[in-house]
């Protein structure tokens, strides 16, 4: 299971995935996140969701909103029974860790990597690859 924070208000009208907009890689750099996971061929075994199910006007999510939505997320966990939960970003990871979610790993949020250039694409891929190897979920060599 891969978990983002919430759908972006700016991208919500054409939302095709939880981490960005319409899937146009030239316009939506966050869509590259999904392209990376395609390389690892894990979509047949992966569930992608957001911790909070609605967008916000200012694209910021308050703790109260996360707490209110958490019951829905817990139902998703019960339904999916994931071996691994990958939290995209610090805010998601910290909240899930405080709520005792098991088998939790953290990756940088795609917007940090691609929009703010916090890390390189190569390092992002290495981070994801090491997590998948740790849980024996890596099925291709990259």
Image (cartoon, grey):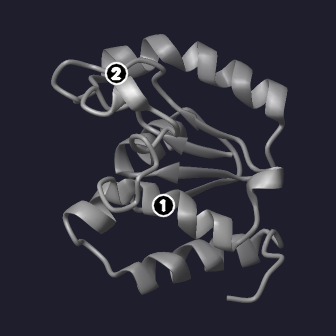
- Tell me, yes or no, if residue 107 can be seen here: no
- How far from the left and from the top, in percent, is residue 131? 65, 71
Classify 10 Å Cα crowding around label 2: few (below 14), some (14-19), many (20 and above): some
Task: Determine the secondary structure under disc 2.
Answer: loop
Q: Residue at the top extreme?
A: 68
Q: How far apart are marks 2 and 1 (CA)?
A: 19 Å
Counting residues from the start of the chain, the first of labels 2 and 1 encountered is 1
- Tell me, yes or no, if residue 110 can be seen here: yes
- How far from the left and from the top, in percent, is residue 9? 28, 26
Q: In this view, does 134 lie to the left or right of 99?
A: right
* Label of residue 55 in the image: 2
Q: In this view, does 24 lie to the left or right of 18?
A: left
Q: Do the residues labelled 2 and 1 touch (CB within 8 Å)?
A: no
Q: Reply above or below: 48 against 103.
A: above
Q: Name the residue under label 1.
A: 33
Residue 68 found in image quarter: top left
Q: Is residue 57 left or right of residue 89?
A: left
Residue 71 found in image quarter: top right
Q: Reply above or below: 110 against 102.
A: below
- Quadrant of the snapshot with the C terminus: bottom right
Name the residue nearer the viewer: 15 or 55. Answer: 15
Name the residue nearer the viewer: 30 or 106. Answer: 30
- How far from the left and from the top, in percent, is residue 57? 19, 18
Task: Determine the secondary structure under disc 1.
Answer: helix
At a point 52% along the width and 40% down the height, the residue shown is 17
At a point 42% along the width and 36% down the height, the residue shown is 5
At a point 22% along the width and 72% down the height, the residue shown is 117
- How far from the left and from the top, in percent, is residue 15? 44, 32
Classify 10 Å Cα crowding around label 1: few (below 14), some (14-19), many (20 and above): many
At a point 81% along the width and 33% down the height, the residue shown is 80
């Amino acid at each position: 299971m891969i978990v983002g924070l919430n759908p972006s208000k700016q991208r919500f009208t054409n939302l095709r995935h939880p981490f960005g907009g319409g899937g146009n890689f030239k316009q939506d750099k966050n869509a590259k996140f999904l392209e990376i996971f395609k390389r690892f061929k894990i979509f047949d075994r992966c569930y992608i969701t957001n911790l909070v199910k609605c967008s916000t006007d200012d694209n910021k999510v308050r703790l109260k909103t996360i707490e209110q939505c958490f019951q829905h997320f817990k139902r998703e966990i019960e339904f999916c029974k994931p071996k691994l939960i990958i939290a995209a970003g610090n805010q998601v990871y910290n909240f899930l860790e405080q709520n005792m979610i098991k088998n939790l790993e953290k990756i940088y949020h795609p917007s940090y990597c691609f929009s703010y250039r916090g890390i390189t694409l190569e390092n992002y891929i290495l981070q994801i690859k090491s997590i998948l190897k740790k849980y024996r979920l890596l099925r291709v060599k990259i």
